[in-house]
Amino acid sequence: MRTSIDLNCDLGEGIGNEAALMPLISSCNLACGGHAGDLETIDKVVQLAKQHKVGVGAHPSFPDREHFGRKEMQLSFKELRDSVLEQIARVNQACLKHQVPLHHIKAHGALYNLCAQKKGYAEFLTEVLTEAYPGIPVYVPFDSEMTRAATGKLKLLFEAFADRNYEPDGSLVSRQKDHAVITDETALIKHVLRMVQRNEIKTLDGDILKTRIDTICVHGDTPKAVEFLQLLNQKLDENQINKTTVSCK
């Protein structure tokens, strides 16, 4: 039996490589005005995703373009709720316009990490999405606070990162540290194949974490993202691993 995996990528972030990336992925996380993105870009990327049969996800963040959504902002949960819902609505409206389903929701940057690590943020996002988008899957890290808060309330698809190293506790190595991003092609392929074939993640210090993975992300702003994904597609095919969008059903 052929193994399959969803390959996702963050798009609409001003890099301008969407046309090159889209044939290489099966789902995308679309910046929706918080850390990056605007209505024109959202519309173009949704059309491109429809053309390539790529699942479209909303990628809300702290409303912080200055730091690309990668720093925590001191907002009330009401302020953050209003921003997150406004961001998701932009992508959802473009999906409705072009008659494609909103495939998933995935928080970005600091918001993603806080929901993974802090119970309060996880419960906050779970409540917001349960009320506004109860049928839409959410990409989250396995065995995270978000997993615990949302299990039984939302459909969860477990995500791992092709181009990021991991700490022993399962968190991503901070971008403030050396070796946070995997830049070596051989190391990236080995990292991904271990995740897909064994449901394991090898941490930066050599520990092995058992996990569950439904989707794997390559960041669109990672240097050589296109080249990495071209090589990754080739190596997945060589290992009889099919690239496929995770079903919403």
Image (spheres, rainbow, N blue to C red):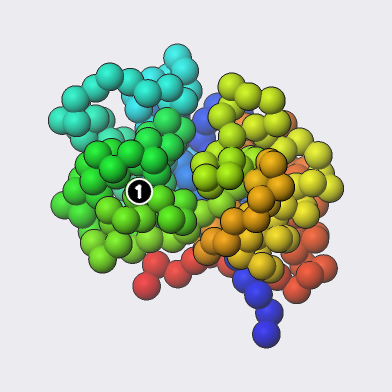
**Element type where label 1 sits in the image:** helix
Q: Residue at x 24, y 30 (%)?
A: 80
Q: Which residue is mark 1?
A: 145
Across and down, in percent, residue 165 comes to 65, 40
Between 123 and 136, which is closer to the camera in this rendering?
123
User: On the image, which quarter does residue 136 sit in?
Assistant: bottom left
Indicate the position of residue 192 as horizontal and vertical percent values. 70, 55
Which residue appears at 58% of the width and 44% of the height?
168
Question: Could you tell me if residue 9 is visible in this image?
Answer: no
Left or right of 225 in this view: 173? left
- Quadrant containing the N terminus is bottom right
Q: Is residue 221 above or below residue 185?
A: above
> Residue 103 versus residue 172: which sits nearer the camera?
172
Q: The C terminus appears in which quarter of the rendering?
A: bottom left
Circle 1: is it few (<14), some (14-19), or many (20+) Cα within 10 Å?
many
Horizontal arrangement in the rendering, residue 39 relative to residue 227 (left or right): left
Q: Is residue 102 above or below residue 212?
A: above
Q: Would you place residue 215 above or below residue 125 in this image?
A: below
Extreme residue toward the bottom, this view: 1
